[in-house]
Amino acid sequence: MNSQQWIEKADKVMMKNVGRYPLVPVRGAGCRVWDADGKEYLDFLAGIAVNSLGHCHPRVVKALQEQAATLMHCSNYYHNAPQIELAELLCRYSFADRIFFCNSGAEANEAAIKLARKYSRDKHGPERYEIITAVESFHGRTMATVSATGQEKVQRFFDPLLHGFTHVCFNDIEALKAAITPNTCAIMLEPIQGEGGINIPSPDYLKEVRELCDQHGLLLVLDEVQTGIGRTGKLFAYEHFGVSPDIMTLAKALGGGGPIGAMLAREDIAAAFTPGTHGSTFGGNPLMTATAVAVIRTILEEGILNHTEEIGEYLLGELEALGSKYPFVKEVRGIGLIIGMNLAMPAGDIVKKGHERGVLLNVTHDTVLRFVPPLIVSKQEVDEMIGILEGIFAEI
Ligand SMILES: *Cc1c(COP(=O)(O)O)cnc(C)c1O
């Protein structure tokens, strides 16, 4: 079947909750995908920062296939070996002492919200449940995470929202200070805002947030669903800012394309999740945790973090050089391979032209071109994408 035939079928049976492009990828390898008509695309979106090792990385495919043929699922009533191995890896390379596994970013954030509330209730009583989050943040699409998200376009139509969230401007420490009340239990932030337009805080912001949390006995929850697992050139973005969170969430890149989320916490906080307080049927099942173990080992053993840092600097430099030639490019900003190019106009048409010319680009926050390619992207592939983008810019 060709792309058009698939799209006509989709039109009849798929819900229209997502505005989909008329593009049907059917196969991928490395930084490239092919659609149902056999057309090739260079992938600079990587499934929204998910396919960090590219498509069908041999180590990831092998781990998934072997585990699928061994034990896919068995229930969290029992211990499972790949889950324990993955938890050990995450604890060894992060601030955390204990891990809870789930299936997505929103679920990881739900778990973080519940843990923050439970810990604070145990310690300070039932009044202390409010969580401060940032304007333009994105934490997911479930009711609690929609309530946590600081974007009207995500929240509208779904009133009443969950009670107990306040939103303050990102990167504004005074606004945070002013928002703290006796009922505040946690501050929840993305270290770099992803969906909100690749917003990078000033170097001291997160340190000041950490100090504020310590002064007031608040939990610092970092949502690293988009920034975690190497995206910034370090395993976790918080490492760039000289802080440790109390709770952290992961998802997107953790499974190398497979659905998995994780919520990580320090020992004393994790202790608030006593038996029966939270759970997930699929969370941490052997299939996905074995895959995630392969993802993390590959990143650590194959120098992917150094490569991400280097190639990220190269891509940033190339985008800045390109941007300096076109007055409609307002700013290029990024760390590692999470880079935004803010334009003076909506970027939707550029994405469509990219598809025509064989590159998967992405726009977030309406005017920001977001570049989150696989971490294994090569200099040649960057040059190829820049060449295509330059061709598009020249026509505007
Ligand atoms: C994508 C994302 C989420 C939501 O993850 P899902 O897997 O779609 O539920 C949450 N937080 C951040 C920062 C994200 O980028």
Image: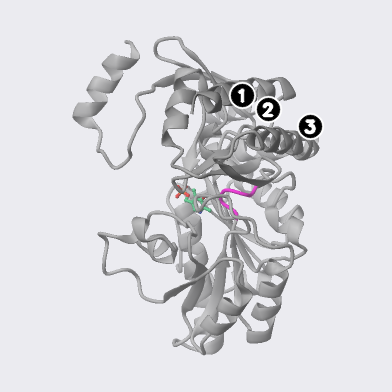
Q: Residue at x 61, y 79 (%)?
A: 174
Q: Are marks 1 and 3 in contact (CB under 8 Å)?
A: no
What is the span of residues highlighted in magenta in the rendered image? 224-228
Which numbered tag is attached to residue 302? 3
Which residue is tagged 2?
A: 377
In the picture, the quarter occupied by the N terminus is: top left
Relative to residue 216, is residue 356 drawn left or right? left
Q: Residue 122 at x, y = what percent? A: 53, 83
User: For mark 3, does the 10 Å Cα neighbourhood hold few (<14), some (14 to 19), or many (20 or more) residues?
Assistant: few
Q: Mark 2 belongs to which amino acid?
A: Val
Q: Secondary structure at mark 2?
A: loop
Relative to residue 47, is residue 214 drawn left or right? right
Alpha carbons under labels 1 and 3: distance apart: 24 Å
Closer to the observer: label 1 or label 2?
1
Q: Nearer the viewer, residue 352 or 379?
A: 352
Q: Residue 284 at x, y = what percent? A: 53, 48
Q: Is residue 269 visible?
A: yes
Q: Is residue 95 above or below residue 116?
A: above
Q: Quadrant of residue 19?
A: top left
Q: Residue 190 at x, y = what percent? A: 58, 59
User: For mark 1, does the 10 Å Cα neighbourhood hold few (<14), some (14 to 19), or many (20 or more) residues?
Assistant: many
Q: Are marks 2 and 3 in contact (CB under 8 Å)?
A: no
Q: Nearer the viewer, residue 272 or 246?
A: 246
Q: Residue at x 23, y 22 (%)?
A: 9
Q: Nearer the viewer, residue 108 or 208?
A: 208
Alpha carbons under labels 2 and 3: distance apart: 14 Å
Which residue is tagged 1?
A: 385
Q: Is residue 122 above or below residue 134?
A: below
Decide which of tag 2 and tag 3 comes sooner along the chain.
3
Closer to the observer: label 1 or label 3?
1
